[in-house]
Image (cartoon, rainbow, N blue to C red):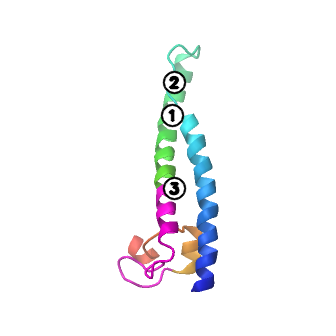
Amino acid sequence: MMMDKSVIESRIKEEIIITEQKVIEYRELTKPISPENAIGRVSRMDAINNKSINDVAFRKAELKLNNLKVALSKIDDTDFGICRNCKQPIPLGRLLLMPQVVKCVNCAN
């Protein structure tokens, strides 16, 4: 699995860059809506609703970024790519799609 690990490692690094960019964007979108903004009541309600949606996305992106960094730090561990529950190898396709996962599809459900 040596070549696979280098492929997974570059995938993790790529995903970290993408996720860091998302965190920056969401941080901008979740800034407080100032009450003195000259927008109508309905527009303000929309803005508050959008902010709460972006808050959730921001937290998810931060969590994913943290998990990706943990995965990158553990890539050389002997149990990297092994399901935490059933101890079977996590398929390469799943690791490439979501390199931060620690469980196979069956155990994740």
| Residue name at image x 43 percent, y 71 percent | 102
Q: Which mark is residue 51?
A: 1
* Quadrant into which the N terminus falls: bottom right
Looking at marks 1 and 3 on the same chain, the residue that comes earlier in the sequence is marked by: 1
Closer to viewer: mark 3 or mark 2: 3
**In the rendered image, which residue does mark 2 sit on?**
33
Tell me if mark 2 has few (under 14), some (14-19) or many (20+) residues whose alpha carbon lies within 10 angstroms of its own.
few
| Residue name at image x 57 percent, y 35 percent | 29
Which secondary structure class fits the magenta region best? Answer: loop
| Residue name at image x 62 percent, y 48 percent | 21
Q: Position of residue 23 (x, y in %)?
A: 56, 46
Closer to viewer: mark 1 or mark 3: 3
Helix, strand or loop at label 3? It is helix
Start-end of magenta stretch: 64-90
How much space separates mark 1 and mark 3, taking CA atoms? 20 Å
How much space separates mark 3 and mark 2, taking CA atoms? 26 Å
